[in-house]
Amino acid sequence: MALLQGRKLLEDAGVIAPTLTAEVLLAHAVGHPRSWLFAHSDEGLREVWWIHYGRYLHQRMEGMPTQYITGKQEFFGREFRVSPDVLIPRPETEHLIEAALKFAATTILDIGTGSGAIAATLALETKADVFATDISAAALQVAKQNAATLKASVAFVQSDLGSAFRDRTFDLIVSNPPYVPEADREALQREVRDYEPALALFAGSDGLSVYARLIPEAARLLKTGGRLIMELGDQSLDRVRRMIDGNWNNLEVVPDLAGKPRVLCISRLL
């Protein structure tokens, strides 16, 4: 009954995937995995479970992403803690991980780490020394907790891009930078616009302001032959490509599952 009621409320509120969402929220309310719900479908809910479930349904109907309600999101087969201080890791970003794993690196820098999903994943999937920066102290706290929980060795530094590093160079720099134009703010889903951190989403009027700083910063921080791998925003490939000067070669574009250009890889030439 609880699942049916929850699904109906979410459906009426226009929430996508109301059945799955009701299951996830109820499982979170009772403190068990979703499979437990079906194994105990004839069991009545305790009063405290109803209270939690009702609150979670209300939050989701108000637009709060399910991941912020449950406090977790899966990425590259691992569970990461998330909060409104960090962007929710997207499946599309796993293409960046796959591209990075093709490049043999002993030192890696993740710029704008957010939840730490990219940095922790690369630390666990490689034997590289991994560093990660973010301008947000609150985001770094989430990232540090994720790395500690997963036993991923990552050195976190609060920094605007890579400005904290003056004498160190890297084999590989990865980044999922902010790339949403300010002009697109009102067109975003309310779950994104109203709940995810603006600092991690928006990049000036055209969505390119961080790329314009990130590419020369990476040229400064990479060893000769080092690789820069960046996630791309929709419709940004051509404009980002025009920012690439003679310091770079070996340009490669990786599409996502929808065929959109999603990841840009370039090598430092000089």
Image (tube, helix red, strand yellow):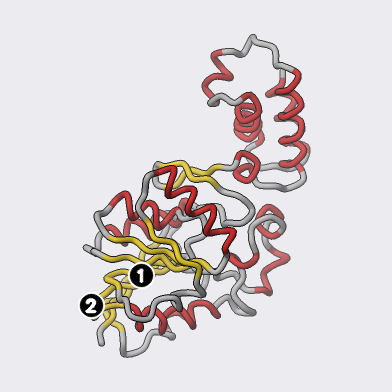
Kind of residue indicated by mark 1: Ile
Q: Nearer the viewer, residue 150 or 166?
A: 166
233 relative to 120 in the view: left or right = right
In which quadrant of the rendered view does residue 243 lie? bottom left
From this viewpoint, which residue is outermost toward the top? 42
**Which residue sits at x=47%, y=65%?**
176
Q: Nearer the viewer, residue 253 or 121?
A: 121
| Residue named by callout 2 | 225
141 relative to 150 in the view: left or right = right
Q: Secondary structure at mark 2?
A: strand
Q: Which mark is residue 173?
A: 1
Q: Position of residue 96 (x, y in %)?
A: 38, 60
Kind of residue indicated by mark 2: Gly
Q: CA distance from mark 2 to mark 1?
A: 12 Å
Residue 239 visible here: no
6 relative to 36 in the view: left or right = right
**Which residue sits at x=71%, y=55%?**
190
**Which residue sits at x=66%, y=35%?**
18
Residue 103 lies, with reference to residue 10, above or below; the image says below
Q: Nearer the viewer, residue 55 or 62?
A: 55
**Which residue sits at x=59%, y=59%?**
138
